[in-house]
Image (spheres, rainbow, N blue to C red):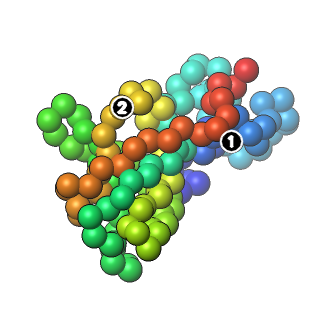
């Protein structure tokens, strides 16, 4: 995933994982441009919910978000964990301008609902 997203999509700016004053490094122009132009539109967040049925090992996990009455792919799933009671946790890169009450679901289980949990730290870079 690191070649598909800029470091800010992984919230690294909020964790002091990016140097904006260091000399040259690979991707520095793209990273700095996203900061100074304010063009980063993604963040790493957690989704949580209880599924009606377990996810089978090896199944691709695709998470969708509601867009009006339709559903669209929510973002890139990095990791998931499912407890014995079918509670699912998913780390996902999503748009950083989503409403807090947006609905998410597992595409293979349309009746499922997942809720967004924002990181426990501020995402602003200042």
Residue picked out by circle 1 = 12
The answer to whether residue 55 is above or below residue 4 is: below
Please provide percent x and percent y for residue 8.
61, 38
Q: Which mark is residue 95?
A: none
Q: In this view of the protein, can residue 9 be seen by the observer?
A: no
Residue picked out by circle 2 = 101
Quick one: SS at disc 1? helix
Sort mark 1 into few (<14), some (14-19) or many (20+) by Cα contacts within 10 Å. some
Q: Is residue 106 left or right of residue 30?
A: left
Q: Choose between 100 and 11: the one closer to the eye.
A: 100
Quarter of the image where the C terminus is located = top right
Q: Residue furthest right?
A: 22
Q: Residue furthest left?
A: 69
Q: Does the CB distance between marks 1 and 2 fall below 8 Å?
A: no
Sort mark 2 into few (<14), some (14-19) or many (20+) by Cα contacts within 10 Å. few
Gap between marks 1 and 2 measured at Cα = 25 Å
Q: Which quadrant holds residue 17?
A: top right
Please provide percent x and percent y for residue 19.
80, 36
Quick one: SS at disc 2? loop
Please provide percent x and percent y for residue 106.
29, 57
């Amino acid at each position: 995933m690191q070649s598909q997203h800029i470091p800010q999509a992984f919230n690294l700016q909020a964790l002091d994982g990016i140097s904006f004053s260091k000399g040259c490094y690979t991707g520095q122009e793209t990273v700095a441009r996203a900061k100074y132009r304010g063009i980063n539109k993604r963040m790493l967040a957690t989704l949580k919910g209880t599924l009606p049925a377990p996810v089978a090992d090896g199944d691709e996990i695709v998470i969708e978000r509601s867009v009006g009455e339709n559903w669209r792919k929510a973002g890139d799933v990095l990791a998931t964990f499912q407890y014995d009671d079918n509670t699912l946790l998913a780390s996902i890169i999503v748009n950083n301008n989503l409403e807090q009450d947006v609905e998410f679901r597992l595409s293979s289980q349309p009746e499922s609902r997942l809720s967004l949990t924002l990181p426990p730290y501020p995402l602003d870079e200042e």
